[in-house]
Image (cartoon, rainbow, N blue to C red):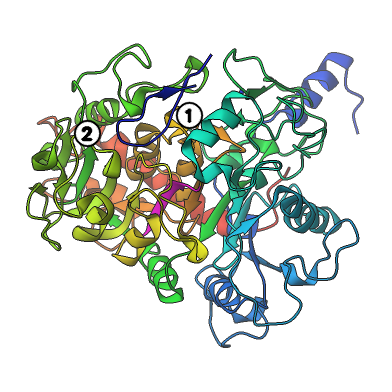
Amino acid sequence: MTVFRRLRAHAAPVLAAPVLAAPVWAALLAVLASPRAARADLAEDQVLVIYDSRVQDSRAVAEFYVGSAKVPGGAGNLPGLHPGARALDISTLSATGGGAAGVLPCDSPPCPATPDVSYGDFAARFRDPIRNYLVAQGLQRRVRCLVLTKGLPHRVHDSDSFGIGDNTSGAATETNNGDATYCALESELSLLLINLNTGEAGGAGDSKADGMIINPYWKATTGFGAWRTFYNQSTKSITNNVGVGIIWKGATGTSSAALNPGDMYLVARLDGNSLADVQNALMRAQNIVLDEDTSAIILDESGSDGIVSPISDTDTEFDNDGPAAINNGDDYEQTRDALIADRRWLPANIRYDPASGPANFLVGPLVSFGGGIVVSNNIAHLASLGANHAGGAPGAAASQYAQSFNYQNGATFNTIESFNARAFGGQGTLAGQEQASDFIASGGTLAVGNVFEPFSLSVPDNLLFVQNFWLGNMTFIEAAYSSFPVISWQQIAIGDPLAKVRRKREDINADGRVDTDDLYAWNEVPSPPDLNRDGTVNAADYAILEKSVRAFENAALNQTTIGKQMD
């Protein structure tokens, strides 16, 4: 049975000390072993930045992020944007299987950027050394987020069909045959503590590296830290029980064999076309303020009926594909409707466009393509079919549209294009598709994308990302992973994992923070804002503010209690 659709224009369909009574002890042990914990916020010291000191850009990015004190041999005297984060020079580790010191195949600096590795090199030079380091340092449960830096690989090639992920027809065959091991390096590292390739011999489903695994953090509504790491080194039960292709699913529940968010890592990447692009994007990520009255969100779908279809794959829309186990619904329309229902975003700036053809392609004012609908607002979130826009795009817009917009600090990118995160490390573009790296170079800040052909069933959900990041209180990496239906596949998150949004209308006293003072100011200002735009200032508006204040203060508290969180 084939359920996969290539993310290409006009593509045809192809193709988881008192003595306590026994019941009291049982209850206590159940709490201690539970995958859920009380504190939800991701702390700086739970982030491990991985760099190679022999790769100049990699070292420079790490130093800029964590500071010179933790990255020897750099420019020096840099305080770091997140000095509480940890750093690991991967060149100091040894590859498994008798490899020489330094996990990248480079004997002497300066080492070039290495965009691609084989699956064998991924396991021997990245997964195993990083895992061994965390275990040796006793950090396998404290560290929750890994960050790869510019110059390190981002693509892992198929174990028996090198390069197949760049060939949409070949990728479809390999996937339908149940033997696709090609993936994003970051996505495969999400299950760092599991040898997914055990048993891999080129057969269908002979290892968990074949196909994709349902992301246990998909659809999350609470912070990643709410999940305990108590069982993250236990053997996991992962089976192919969703009935379509090779889509694996971990057991659910609270047993040691269940696959819960506490058993995985969130993995981000700091990358761009140049070192300056990365550093500028990181700076933009430090003070993200959403002006709900002026910033726009782009939902440029095309070829759509504009209504929420309850049945996957029957409406021919890329945003509503795949089996129920990994399909969250008609994404673009649901995102539009959720934003309207939420009411915090000015409705006129929710730019949903279902129409096809060059005349209906949404573009910005900075580049003239000779047509299209121009949106001049500062863009907060860019979601588009891009090169897959039904009926085509005006001029060169299909591959350059992201370069035409004005962006606010923190602007995010999620387009339905197969290879929109391919070009890092000098890898180059494919199929005339827009690149996340060009979005970042043009003033964008954060992006999710695909490094190889992912097929339409696996694209990240805008609804979940927007609700958790722009309208919620998650960090970027939490919101990104909450939107990924699957891991051990093609999706990566690019940008500062700790980036977080402050909404301007919730800063009641206009002091640049959302905190308790804003709750007091609510009762002191003559006219507090109608946050949900329902025409009445009431308890519902105050509840929105209170929730944001609590989230920001919890995050601040977490930074002052580093090392105190219990596993």
* Residue 257 seen from this side: yes
Amino acid carrying mark 2 in the image: Ala
Which residue is tagged 1?
A: 219
- In the rendered structure, does residue 450 fall within the stretch colored magenta? yes
Drawn side of residue 213 relative to residue 169, left or right: right
Q: Residue visible at 65% across and 23% down?
A: 249
Name which of mark 1 and mark 2 comes first in the sequence.
1
Q: What crowding class fits label 2: few (fewer than 14 Cα within 10 Å), some (14-19), or many (20 or more)?
A: many
> Label 1: few (<14), some or many (≥20) within 10 Å?
some
Quarter of the figure with residue 152: bottom right
Q: Residue at x 58, y 88 (%)?
A: 76
Which residue is denoted by mark 2 in the rendering? 390
The one nearer the camera, 40 or 357, is 357
- Dominant SS of magenta comes to strand
- What residue is rendered at 67% in x and 71% in y? 52
Residue 41 location in percent, x, y? 54, 47
- Residue stretch in magenta: 445-451
User: What residue sits 58% from the left and 70% below the top?
Assistant: 113
What percent of the width, then of the height, locates residue 546? 35, 40
Is 265 left or right of 99, judged from the image as shown? left
Asked if residue 104 lies left or right of residue 532, the reply is right
Q: Using the image, determine if residue 251 lies above or below residue 179.
A: above
Asked where in the image residue 537 lies, by quadrant, the reply is top left
